[in-house]
Image: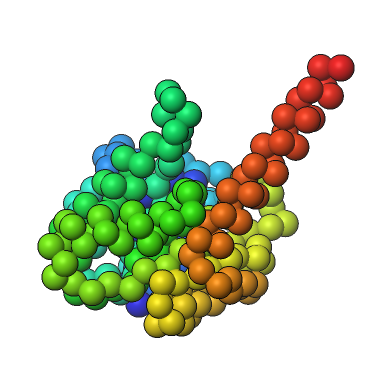
Amino acid sequence: MNIAIIGQGYVGLTISAFAGEHHEVIGFDLNPTIVECLNKGTSHIEGVDSLSLAKLIAKGKYRATTNPADIKGSDIVVIAVPTPLDSNRKPDLSYIDSACKVIGENLDAPALIINESTSFPGTVRNLIKPEIEKYSAGTVDHMYAVSPERVDPGRTDWNQKNTPRLYSGLTQAAFSAVREFYSTFCDNLVEVSSPEVAEAAKLFENTFRQVNIALVNEFAQI
């Protein structure tokens, strides 16, 4: 399958590296310096070594680009962009909106759209789907799914292959398609009843980790 992954940061490049073992991957990023380095086989992400990346490039399984038109013809598009908080501690959704614009304006055939970016419950159903349809003028009928990223930087015992991954879709066809995709490089897939459940679970996981880090930091001061 032809896979486009929007965002080549620690989430997007990690998925690109694992998916590239089984599919042909286009890694889209707006940063030309990052794209240039990636196409030379130089990784900027811990957990993705440059040698493995160079091998994928040599096999024609991976290419990075800043040209949004290069995602045309993709069977699957994965959104893996940052979702930081703004100065008012509210979600900055500009990166997701930018990804939706790229998809809506350049993907002219039905595909599976998967969101891996961390966001609030309802993001896929109430934000990503309507935004893509807005930019494409509703001319393409995509499938929509979510499978929140689960990258644990610095860990060598847990990776994309053995870390449990939640997934869900807006339709039964999307359920089947997202499961088929991730099963090519993930051993432990957990289906949940709706995209909102998967999105909420990711927020809970992040909150749990943040509370634990805060507790350890306080204890270290004591």
Image quarter hosting the N terminus:
bottom left
Residue at the right extreme? 222
The coloring applied to the image is rainbow
Q: Position of residue 109 (x, y in %)?
A: 19, 74
Q: Nearer the viewer, residue 104 or 162?
A: 104
Query: Residue at point 79% right, 30% down?
Result: 216
Q: Nearer the viewer, residue 55 or 213?
A: 213
Q: Quadrant of residue 126?
A: bottom left
Query: Residue at point 21% right, 52% down?
Result: 101
Image mark count:
0
Query: Residue at point 20% right, 65% down?
Result: 107
Query: Residue at point 30% right, 62% down?
Result: 129
Relative to 15, is 133 on the left or the right? left
Q: Position of residue 30 (x, y in %)?
A: 27, 42
Q: Is residue 178 above or below residue 201?
A: below
Q: Nearer the viewer, residue 133 or 180?
A: 133
Q: Nearer the viewer, residue 178 or 163?
A: 178
Asked if residue 108 can be seen in this view, the reply is: no
Image quarter hosting the C terminus:
top right
Q: Is residue 121 above or below residue 147?
A: above
Relative to 76, is 181 on the left or the right? right
Q: Position of residue 111 (x, y in %)?
A: 29, 73
Relative to 166, is 120 on the left or the right? left
Q: Position of residue 17 (x, y in %)?
A: 47, 60
Asked if residue 7 can be seen in this view, the reply is: yes
